[in-house]
Image (cartoon, coloured by chain):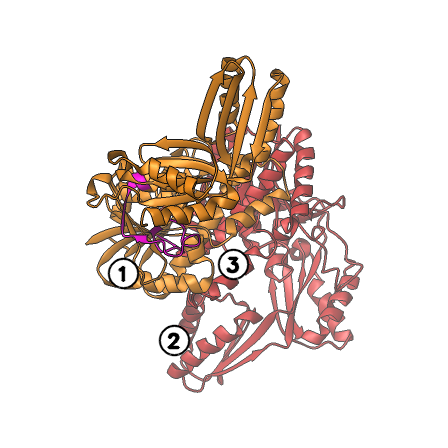
Chain colours: A orange, B red
Amino acid sequence: MKRSVLKFGGSSVSDFLKIKNLAGYLKSRIENQEQLVVVVSAMGKTTDDLLTSVSHLTAKPNELDLAMLLNTGEQQTISFLSLALNDLNVRTKPLTGYQAGIETRGNHLKSKISSIKADFLKELFESNDLLIVAGFQGFNEFGELTTLGRGGSDTTAVALAAALDCTCEIYTDVTGVFSTDPRIYKDAKRRELISFEEMMEMSALGAGVLETRSVELANNHSIPIYLAKTLSDEKGTWIVPNDQMLERKAVTGVALDKEMAHVTITHPLETKAFLTDLFSELEGSEINIDMISQIQNKDGLQLSFTVKESEESVLNDLFDLLKKSYENLYVTIETTYCKLSVIGAGMRDMTGVASKIFNTLLTSNIPFYQVTTSEISVSYVLDEKNGEYAARLLCQAFDL
Amino acid sequence: MKRSVLKFGGSSVSDFLKIKNLAGYLKSRIENQEQLVVVVSAMGKTTDDLLTSVSHLTAKPNELDLAMLLNTGEQQTISFLSLALNDLNVRTKPLTGYQAGIETRGNHLKSKISSIKADFLKELFESNDLLIVAGFQGFNEFGELTTLGRGGSDTTAVALAAALDCTCEIYTDVTGVFSTDPRIYKDAKRRELISFEEMMEMSALGAGVLETRSVELANNHSIPIYLAKTLSDEKGTWIVPNDQMLERKAVTGVALDKEMAHVTITHPLETKAFLTDLFSELEGSEINIDMISQIQNKDGLQLSFTVKESEESVLNDLFDLLKKSYENLYVTIETTYCKLSVIGAGMRDMTGVASKIFNTLLTSNIPFYQVTTSEISVSYVLDEKNGEYAARLLCQAFDL
């Protein structure tokens, strides 16, 4: 009997009609002699609503309490979906993260999965047609409830597929992976197949259909992921291990990230101590930085990097603190820029990609302020107003 | 250090301001060198709202799913209260029924507590000022989530007090126990002290401040209960073991139950078989009956009893079924009656109580249709329209 893990996000279960329709779809899969583990998120905006409620009680919520509170969102969804499936005579077993044995380590709100009771889950199929597991949830070594952080339900699904050694289907409100955002370039092509490596670059670079973390996990365990639109007949995209990629185009995607800020720091002296302090503060505040460029010359240090635009106020606090220890520290945080990335696993084997991008931007008079490259991507910092136009030009240039 | 279990019902935690105020009150108790276990219910109408949601999905909800869903209500309250207390620097440990080790047996929705991990809870006080336990919740031998049924949070609180061998304070929106409902008789006196036995009669007879079940549990373990109004300076009522009652008035309370139906059954033949079938059907439908009177003479059987008015439609179905097996079965269900009960633990030792009630009703021309007596109560079935007037007359007669 074929076994699969299926994951449905918050927008796929945002009201009771959607839950009923989903139950009908799952029943049809069961009747097709499949064994399904269904992972669901909290309904619609439930998690955000709970966070708003918390703000009435405290400005600095305790992590343990908050994880316990957020856990109720997914627990409600698994109950509702199980009620709807039982109404259709499907024998279900709804399981919280704790009940499914999803053990985690670390921070209550950004936990990492350390183990899953796979044998227990397999046994449950002896008396159930379908298991429903609450996404996003886990428990730690003290028996306390934890959450896996935003996008955590994808991680739950991939981790379950890895533990049960089966494929993972992730359903959202988009139809698979496109070479670029179809809202930017209407002729963007849907990819039938994409490698984990490319998908990771796409996610990390802002084309966030799937969290990088869950793609990494799938890559580590070679679990193929099928990404498609919930209850739709449109075909989705298979994300597969790199060695399963037959076709290999040089360039396979263009990702545009407008929600970024570009930080430039200049300091005439004390470079080493300053950098140590800066990176330890950034780590302490859990700020991820990207596109790091560092120049050091007779005028001192010049350091640039990009961060999420939402981190701007945390960054301002952080630099205010650093300025107390470092005189003559000069910082600019620019939020009118965007990051444009060109991605392709074949890029490393082929020449001319970087120069083709360079020429495309240059001949169209689009200035750029920073460039960084990885093995399978090239990223440019541009003015936000030029972002979409540049993305379209590059899609045309690479026939995406 | 004095240890107590405190229980706050849904109306005491129905909004965030109430939760904040409750947190402030609990902090003041902690500062007074007390060890507290706080049991809370779901906020306000949460449980009812969840049940309404379920009706969108299925007409016959699966018990396991429903118990899992309802559990989220209390889990949210313990999280919110813990967040509010942590904001005041009180070290809390919020615990679901599962985490508190509240093991149950039986039906998922009407479970009975079989054990509580008292030692584990005591150890938690080594690193916490206060434990917050979700009321109403438990788990069964299969690790499935269960609920204790309506009023279950009181049961959780009393069971915790029994396991920890301490007193139990139950806070609601009424100020303790009155000799009768103050809405009926404005001069009704608050009782400072009442015995478990009297309280059980009061509860069972419709003056439902506390569920009978939790009073029984407190009685079995001799756990004194203090019943008072949430965050109020008004004194409440201590409910204590019978042998701790010093004063013993003959009559201590008058309870009026208007939400009752009076059933009269007549059948000319086949008495024994019919009664066996009737009581097994009533048990199967989980209908509690009260005030049973049975007369058997040459005209056959005449049986009367009272039930909750809300059971009327279930009863009608039940009698329709019985009429198929028993011809000449004649049933009337009267909903315009009420039940008036006079309660007092001292009643059994003193004479004249029944005759005083009898005379009071008779001289005021209040007809009654049935009378039953127990060791510590006398109940009358009257016309509903006479109920409140009769209650006031009896309160005056017995100086309540």
x and y percentages locating residue B235 in the rendered image: 74, 45
Q: Chain of mark 2?
A: B
State whether residue B176 is above or below residue B278: above
Question: What is the C-alpha distance between the residues marked 1 and 2?
Answer: 51 Å
x and y percentages locating residue B114 in the rendered image: 43, 45
Q: Please identify the quadrant where the C terminus of chain B is shown.
A: bottom right
Q: Amino acid at mark 1?
A: Arg
Q: Bounds of the magenta span?
A: A171-198
Mark number, residue B50: 3
- Report helix, strand or loop for mark 3: helix
State whether residue B134 is above or below residue A371: below
Q: Which dot, 3 or 1, sits closer to the camera? A: 1
Q: Amino acid at mark 3?
A: Leu
The structure residue drawn at horizontal position 59% and vertical position 51%, both measured from the top left corner, is B43
- Report helix, strand or loop for mark 2: helix
Q: Which dot, 1 or 2, sits closer to the camera? A: 1
x and y percentages locating residue A231 in the rendered image: 35, 61
Q: Please identify the quadrant where the N terminus of chain B is shown.
A: top right
Q: Chain of mark 3?
A: B
Q: Which residue is mark 1?
A: A29
Residue B323 found in image quarter? bottom left
Q: Residue furthest front?
A: A363
For marks 3 and 2, the one nearer the N-term is 3
Mark 1 crowdedness (10 Å alpha carbons): few <14, some 14-19, many ≥20: few
Do the residues at pointers 1 and 2 share their chain? Answer: no
